[in-house]
Structure formats: structure tokens, C-alpha cells
Amino acid sequence: MTITKSCPVSLPATGYLRLPEVLGLYPVSRSTWWAGCRSGRYPPPIKLGVRCTAWRVEDIRALIERAANAGAAT
């Protein structure tokens, strides 16, 4: 998996991203993402409603930066 340091999509400073948006930025499958959330590898989701789950933009940005830095270190 290759993740570039700069995101092709500009992220807002704050806010929330739904799962399709997250997976567009961090290319893993839905099942891998949910397993990573359960294990603590990926940021925890935030329930915005009964059927609405999202992730904080700040958490996703930090995840992408950590992955880019880890890839640059190898």
C-alpha cells in the first residue's frame, strides 16, 4: 500500500468524514477498516445518529501523516 504525503483532496480543518470518504483517502477495504477500528489501529468512529457514523477529520489527517512518515522511514 502506498500513501502519498499530500492528500489529493483538500480536507477541511475540522469536521467529520463518512466511511466512503475515509476509504477514498486511506485505501483499505471496509472490513479491514472496521477491524482496525476495533483493534485500535485506526481512529475510533463517532456516532452522529442512529445510523450515521463518521470520523474526525483531524484523526484521519493524523493517520495519513503517520502512514506517510512510516513509509518514508523504510
Image (cartoon, helix red, strand yellow):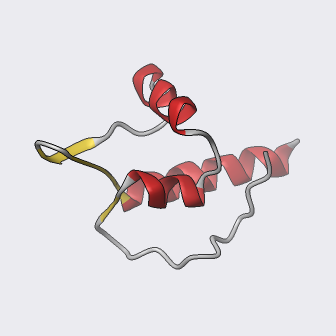
Q: Residue at x 48, y 36 (%)?
A: 42
Left or right of 61 on screen, residue 13: left
User: Residue 60 at x, y = what percent?
Assistant: 47, 54
Q: Nearer the viewer, residue 28 or 14?
A: 28
Compared with residue 72, is residue 15 higher up or lower down, i.e. above or below?
below
The count of marks equals: 0
Q: Residue furthest left?
A: 50
Q: Residue at x 31, y 69 (%)?
A: 14
Left or right of 15 on screen, residue 4: right
Q: Residue at x 62, y 48 (%)?
A: 66
- Quadrant (top left/top right/bottom left/bottom right) for the N terminus: top right
Q: Is residue 65 visible?
A: yes
User: Residue 16 at x, y = what percent?
Assistant: 30, 61
The part of the image, by quadrant, that contains residue 45 is top left
Q: Residue at x 80, y 47 (%)?
A: 71
Q: Is residue 41 visible?
A: no
User: Residue 13 at x, y = what percent?
Assistant: 37, 74
